[in-house]
Amino acid sequence: VLQFGLQRRVETLLREYISKEPMRGTLSDGFSSRSSSTGSLSGYDGFFEQQEPRTSAVMEKILRRRSLQLLDQQQAWKESEEGEKMQRFRKSLPSYKERDALLKTISRNQVVVITGETGCGKTTQIPQYILEAEIEAGCGSNCRIICTQPRRISAMAVSERVAAERGENLGESVGYRVRLEGIKGRDTRLLFCTTGILLRRLLVDRNLKGVSHVIVDEIHERGMNEDFLLIVLKELLPRRPELRLILMSATLNADQFSSYFGGVPMVHIPGFTYPVRTYFLEDILEMTGYRLTPSNQTDDYGQDKSWKKQTLRKRKSQIAFVVEDALEVANLKEYSSQTQNSLSCWNPDSIGFNLIENVLCHLCNNEKPGAVLVFMTGWDDINSLKDQLQAHPLLGDPSRVLLLVCHGSMASSEQRLIFDKPEDGVRKIVLSTNIAETSITIDDVVFVIDCGKAKETSYDALNNTPCLLPSWISKAAAGQRRGRAGRVQPGECFCLYPKCVYDAFADNQLPELLRTPLQSICLQIKSLKLGSISDFLSRALQSPKLLSVQNAIEYLKIIGALDEEEKLTILGRHLSMLPVEPKLGKMLIMGAIFNCLDPILTVVAGLSVRDPFLMPIDKKDLAEQAKSQFAARDYSDHLAIIRAYEGWKDAEREQSGYDYCWKNFLSAPTLKAIDSLRKEFFSLLKDIGLVDDDPNVYNGWSNDGDLIRAVICTGLYPGICSVVNKETSISLKTMEDGRVLLYSNSVNGRESNIPYPWLVFNEKIKVNSVFLRDSTAISDSVLLLFGGKFSCGEVDGHLKMLGGYLEFFMKPSLAETYMNLKRELEQLIQSK
Ligand code: CDP
Ligand code: MG
């Protein structure tokens, strides 16, 4: 009865918020405006200012004048010294030769597919060609070009570059928009945005009114958002005959896109690249393997000789280990399933760092000048290797080495450094994720080191379990990586895997739509009113498995985002507008409704960035201890994040944030990222109208640990497992998997007794057994009251489900309570 009452309250509130129509424009863009250098963003109603409805004769004149001004401005810039240099550079790009042909094809066809080697000038030039042609034709004021990028960092970097090429500041004719951030001005005609932003835009503007060109970049990556966008655009095209769609792809696999749109024309930009010599592991070992000390660098490793000796010994044994393994793999003549098997056993990660260091030593000491680009698996690896290289300058004089990192979540000030050329004699080394594979071009790269793996999400539909694991890249990706070395002169590529491993790589990577959980995308299909989810997805380039689709729909029903007829509920509508996973969105909404916003913002930001707790392998025990101090008998990893963050904020105020992080094994960059994301989420909720101005209200209950647990539970439900304390250990069970385990870096993982009957968790990952990541212990009553839909209508169904849980876990006392509740409720409904 209580839950029914709570649900009703929540539902009424949500209904109220959604009826505040004027807010919706801002909300649906997931965008808190940051003022641009020119023009203001106030009255901002989406991508571009919608001028058409107001077009009077006067308006026409103003627009015309602006357009002419733009032209004059460009002319002046082109004649300046800087501008001339830039023009020369632009004309040297392979895409320039195809400019006229491209423009002609685009004007004559509604859809065009453009392919070309990475770096030939697709992203930076083609949108500009269109813009320039439109301005020259006097149509500048009517032209509005959107160019989508799969990642926020590339949208930002590219827009900045294009503005610079035009001698402008960002926010003049060129702007960008990514989640929660952007710069655009009154005269912006070319907007780079993430694919997600365009999808969100389609929520409120189904016909993309006023947009003249949509350019979808990097479609070869087959990201989920891109595949999704293509289905939507394909259906939009007949409704907007004058809209132009341009698809851009790096690799040659472009026929599929052309035929998806009914055999549209393809234009290929022939590129020139220098030859790249490839070395596989066998060659590398021969080249560097046993010569552990580079010859011209006998004793300069630093004062600490004992360290050096130790490291060398350690390395020697590791190298030997690699050689053995590599040879073993190499000896498997048949590259059949057997090879595949041994590939999955052969894990270069543990030896990767030393191998990379070896190759870097070799390059720094023996090779011609040129930047080195190292492809690594993920952010964590990059940072650890960076620390390792900085702590022990094996590469020689540190002032001759410029060590940089490149990954999706770095700050934009960091980004710029990557593109700059270092002084003569300084070797630039960039440690990067696969982001530098196609979307970011670093010009002076001559050497590539490729670890052969990338973090890839995959999804086990059968067990409904998502995984994010490093996996082998495809041959296409390896080719891309290699190609990065041959852009300015003949280059070299060092593959840290044996040739036979390469031979066993798949040709292309599986499209993301086929390897990720589909909840967010299903929610989006519903909120865009695109009809039945499974019908819609069956129209994709490659449609996902039916089981994955069903799982996603089922999940959305359980959390109350969809009703039994697959219709979007009020909660679902709110969730579809928040740019985070449904479970995190639900937590945010409930945190605001239940007035405990501050801690919930921290949890949600923490879960969407990454774990702030560092777990260095050699100090794991100490790090785990440090973390468990933050949990202080709370049995919750999420509360530990809240405490760690709050402690850090206090320390920052006293200028001792760094010490605090060091002592407590916390990552300062991650905490900073959490901090800024929290602010962004807050302004988002404020835009929606979910929080008012008074912190005493929205934080009225922020110190109530039980309420915070409850709100965490509303978000993470149905991710629950039952806890049974045995004499010395704990037995955990979930409904789908049976017995599960906790990661040891969870604060609950070290407990031998958890005085709560349930844990809610936000992620489970299947390795050999199923492991739960961060978890929070909750009581029976929290589960009964908060573990549900919070969007009523279907109370009975929900109780049935809870009943199912209770029966399954055989908690007789609770089952009885539940039966009583159900009876009372039935009476209540009947008497109504
Ligand atoms: O999209 P695509 O890979 O075809 O090439 P692009 O990103 O348009 O880059 C074309 C050229 O512009 C690159 O080869 C770089 O030389 C240069 N560029 C740059 O100098 N700085 C940037 N931020 C982006 C591109
Ligand atoms: Mg590009």
Image (cartoon, rainbow, N blue to C red):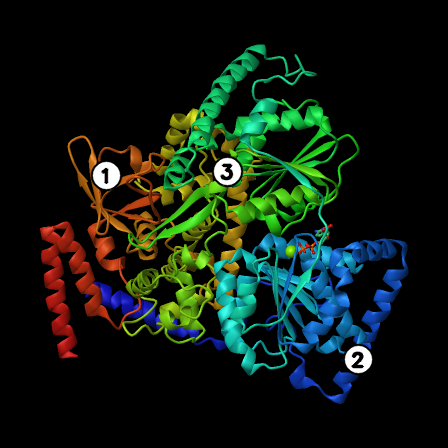
Instruction: Tell me, for residue 64, which label it has, or none.
Output: 2
Q: Residue furthest bottom?
A: 57
- The percent coordinates of residue 470 (x first, y second) are 45, 42
Instruction: Tell me, for residue 754, which label it has, or none.
Output: 1
Residue 505 seen in the figure? yes
User: Which residue in the protein does label 3 denote?
Assistant: 380
Q: Quadrant of the C terminus?
A: bottom left
Q: Image check: 629 left or right of 499? A: left
Q: What residue lies at 78% left-to-right and 61% top-to-bottom? A: 97
Frontmost residue, 398 versus 114: 114
Q: What residue lies at 37% left-to-right and 54% top-to-bottom? A: 701
Residue type at mark 1? Ile
Classify mark 1: helix, strand or loop. loop
Q: Are marks 3 and 2 in contact (CB under 8 Å)?
A: no
Q: Earlier in the sequence, mark 1 or mark 2?
A: 2
Number of numbered tags placed on the structure image: 3
Disc 1 crowd rating (10 Å Cα; few below 14, some 14-19, many 20+) is: some
Q: Earlier in the sequence, mark 3 or mark 1?
A: 3
Q: CA distance from mark 1 to mark 2?
A: 71 Å
Residue type at mark 3? Asp
Residue type at mark 2? Arg
Query: Taking 643 as reference, is 578 above or below it?
Result: below
Query: Taking 27 as reference, is 452 above or below it?
Result: above
